[in-house]
């Protein structure tokens, strides 16, 4: 207890209750050299005194008193102050009521009259010693529980610090890599964009035209992703090029793009764009980026069930809901889901999708919310404020 900084309990307060002043005087003479003794001349007075001064450590009451008997008084005490030790003094003719009172828990001990002084002191010392031991045990258990909680919190803090350090190292590495390849990717993507544009212009087939448009959108999204990873690794805010665009068109194009992902080929997407949702003012490439991350995560969570995509209007905002009936997430997983490099699908996901989706939301002064529980649906909600949205 000293090592834990816990002060030991001391039990010294004894309340004596008897309607006979001579009996009280004898009890006080026997006990007050060793303990702090107070007196009351009946049960009602004792209850009032306890209410005023607080419960003592031990109550010693005579059994035969006018009004409340000793057992009746101590039964009331036991209901309100069960931690107080209780002793009753009785004659030999009251053995059965005393045994019954002990069995009901009204008293913890009884002593027959006439009692011996040494025996009385020994009984009081034993009772208070047991009470002190119980109080010390309770304090010790509470202190150990608090220490365990503190150690657990310290351990969690150390683990988080280690994870943050590891993430910082990975970000630094990622920053160096993306800084070196962004220029090369830009050049290669420029060549691919030129070839796709030539194909689109030179061929009149509608299917080829549609495929070329999808390919161009994918190439632009790829370059934006590389650039954003670079910005993220260097802790730079995302650049937003706002314009007013058609929401349904962006959602449909994003779903078509995700459907080509090997992880999502077996997934069916159900799209619902509510009436009144037409235009959104924001960066279409960024919005597609965030939606792609949400759709791909939903597909990975449960590839055999439909992923439900709903777009609805809120107060000067557009809300994108993506719901899957997959494996679900624990509160701990939800808390970490937006951390960089954290993924529930190792080997299939770098762990940056939701991180960048969160950055996209913030760059539009919006938010990304996640709701889930293990074995149940996961609901991702992307809210993008927009003056062009319906109210």
Image: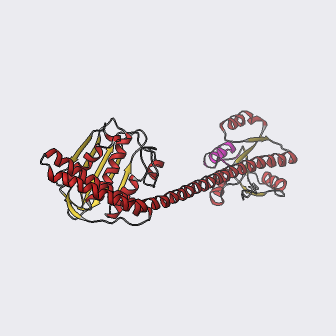
Residue 299 falls left or right of residue 7: left
- Residue 172 in the image: above or below residue 211: below
Which residue lies at the image location 43% right of the left edge and 44% below the top edge?
329
Which residue lies at the image location 72% right of the left edge and 56% below the top edge?
4
Which residue lies at the image location 62% right of the left edge and 57% below the top edge?
51
Front in this rendered view, residue 62 or 60: 60
Residue 55 falls left or right of residue 201: right
Horizontal and vertical percent position of residue 190: 28, 59
Q: Do we see residue 116 in this rendering?
A: yes
Q: Quadrant of residue 52?
A: bottom right
- Residue 44 in the image: above or below residue 244: above
**Region of the chain picked out in magenta, as a range:** 65-83
Residue 105 falls left or right of residue 373: right
- Residue 96 in the image: above or below residue 216: above
Front in this rendered view, residue 339 or 177: 177
Horizontal and vertical percent position of residue 186: 33, 60
**Quarter of the image where the N terminus is located:** bottom right
Q: Quadrant of residue 15?
A: bottom right
Horizontal and vertical percent position of residue 381: 32, 52
Front in this rendered view, residue 337 or 217: 217
Which residue lies at the image location 42% right of the left edge and 44% below the top edge?
348
């Amino acid at each position: 207890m000293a090592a834990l900084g816990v002060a030991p309990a001391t039990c010294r307060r004894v309340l004596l209750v008897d309607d006979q002043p001579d009996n009280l005087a004898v009890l006080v003479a026997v006990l007050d050299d060793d303990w702090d003794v107070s007196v009351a001349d009946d049960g009602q007075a004792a209850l009032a005194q306890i209410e005023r001064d607080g419960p003592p450590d031990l109550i010693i009451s005579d059994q035969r008193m006018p009004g409340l008997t000793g057992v009746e008084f101590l039964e009331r005490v036991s209901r309100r102050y069960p931690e107080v030790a209780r002793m009753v003094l009785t004659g030999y003719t009251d053995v059965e009521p005393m045994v019954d009172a002990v069995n009901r828990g009204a008293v913890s001990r009884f002593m027959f009259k006439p009692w011996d002084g040494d025996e009385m002191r020994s009984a009081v010392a034993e009772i208070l010693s047991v009470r002190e031991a119980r109080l010390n045990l309770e304090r010790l258990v509470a202190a150990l529980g608090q220490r365990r909680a503190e150690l657990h919190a310290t351990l969690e803090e150390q683990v988080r610090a280690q994870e943050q350090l590891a993430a910082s190292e990975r970000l630094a590495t990622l920053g160096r890599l993306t800084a070196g390849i962004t220029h090369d990717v830009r050049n290669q993507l420029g060549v691919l964009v030129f070839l796709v544009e030539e194909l689109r212009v030179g061929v009149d087939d509608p299917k080829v035209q549609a495929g070329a448009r999808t390919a161009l959108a994918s190439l632009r999204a790829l370059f934006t992703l590389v650039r954003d990873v670079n910005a993220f690794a260097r802790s730079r805010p995302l650049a937003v090029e706002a314009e007013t665009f058609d929401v349904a068109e962006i959602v449909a194009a994003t779903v078509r793009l995700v459907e080509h992902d090997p992880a999502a080929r077996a997934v069916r997407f159900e799209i619902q764009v509510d009436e009144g949702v037409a235009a959104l003012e924001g960066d279409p490439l960024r919005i597609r980026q965030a939606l792609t991350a949400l759709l791909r995560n939903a597909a990975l969570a449960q590839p055999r069930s439909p992923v439900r995509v709903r777009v609805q209007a809120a107060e000067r905002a557009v809300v994108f809901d993506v719901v899957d009936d997959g494996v679900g997430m624990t509160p701990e997983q939800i808390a970490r889901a937006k951390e960089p490099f954290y993924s529930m699908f190792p080997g299939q996901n770098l762990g940056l999708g939701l991180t960048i989706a969160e950055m996209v939301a913030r760059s539009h002064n919006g938010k990304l919310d996640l709701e889930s529980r293990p074995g149940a649906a996961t609901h991702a909600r992307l809210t993008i404020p927009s003056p062009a949205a319906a109210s």
